[in-house]
Amino acid sequence: MPVASTSSPAQLLRYRFDAPDQLERHFHVIDRRAVFFWSANLATFAEGTRILLEISFATNEQKSTLRGTVATRETGALPGYWVVFPSGFLQRWREQSTAERRHGRIATDVMVRVKRAGQPEPMLGRIFDVSMMGMRLTGVGELGTVGSELELSLFLPPRGWPTELGRGRLARVGDREAGITLLRSDPEWRKASTRLFEAAREAWQLTREVAHPALCCRGGKVLEPALPHAFMRR
């Protein structure tokens, strides 16, 4: 089975359950991982493909966006892919009576180059989510102190996305995570940041939403293969 490139953006998926109780049946917690089956009839993946999965429900407005990885391929009577997510999202989801919505923020997974003043070469990271005014980065190195100005550009941007993003200001620093405020005083920077947000939103709008099969979960039976032994041994 082919292995996905680490520089490729995550695959966007959207799945709508009829009701929240179905989510508990489809996500299997094993050793701090939540394993979810995605039918091969819906999409084809390479092993290691990063996944951004948006979950919604027909009965309410609750939504969550999960980040995972394609682990194994199922080739039996029900072909598809087992996708692994951190199991912590289930506990957070149970504790929240409303959606994990980030108002005005859109989850994405494109690579970004970040360059500090005086730094010879930019560092690479990924944009975790973006708004009209800023972005959250992951996987980045030392970006300086809060308030530092940074030069930003996308690395291998998808078609239709801007390359040069102009400048931003470091607003928050965490463990391999950073919050960036985009500087919009320059008309070109403002245009680029607006296009970045619109491109992220359009990517989700163009992603087909898959509905939970009507015959699934009737009588508590989930229409998916048995969990692979590889998961049970770990």
Image (cartoon, rainbow, N blue to C red):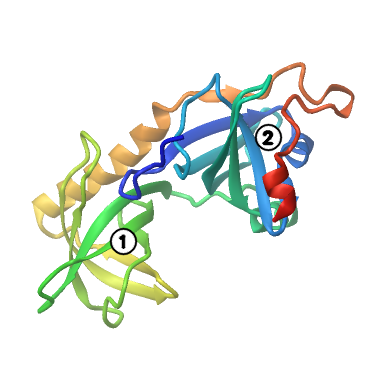
- Is 172 placed above or below 41 here? below
Q: Residue at x 46, y 32 (%)?
A: 45
- Using the image, determine if residue 45 lies above or below residue 24: above
Mark 1 Cα shell of 10 Å, populated few (<14), some (14-19), many (≥20): many
On the image, the x and y values in percent for residue 203 come to: 36, 34
| Quadrant of image for the C terminus | bottom right
Q: Nearer the viewer, residue 38 or 133?
A: 38
Amino acid type of the residue tagged 1 in the rendering: Gly
- The local secondary structure at tag 1 comes to strand
In which image quadrant can residue 19 be found? top right
Q: Position of residue 83 (x, y in %)?
A: 58, 41
The amino acid marked with disc number 2 is: Asn
At 76% from the left edge and 22% from the top edge, which residue is drawn? 216
Label of residue 80 in the image: none
Other residues around mark 2 within 10 Å, as few (<14) / some (14–19) / many (≥20): few
Q: Quadrant of residue 23?
A: top right
Could you say which disc has been placed on residue 60 in the image? 2
- Identify the residue at horizontal 21%, vertical 65% (top origin): 114
Q: CA distance from mark 1 to mark 2?
A: 35 Å
The numbered disc on residue 125 is 1
Determine the residue located farthest toward the bottom in the rendered image: 145
Q: Is residue 61 above or below residue 109?
A: above
Point 30% across, 56% down: residue: 133
Give the image location of residue 88, x and y in percent.
66, 58
Compared across the picture, whether 156 is left or right of 223 comes to left
Q: Would you say 105 lies left or right of 162 here?
A: right
Q: Nearer the viewer, mark 1 or mark 2?
A: 1
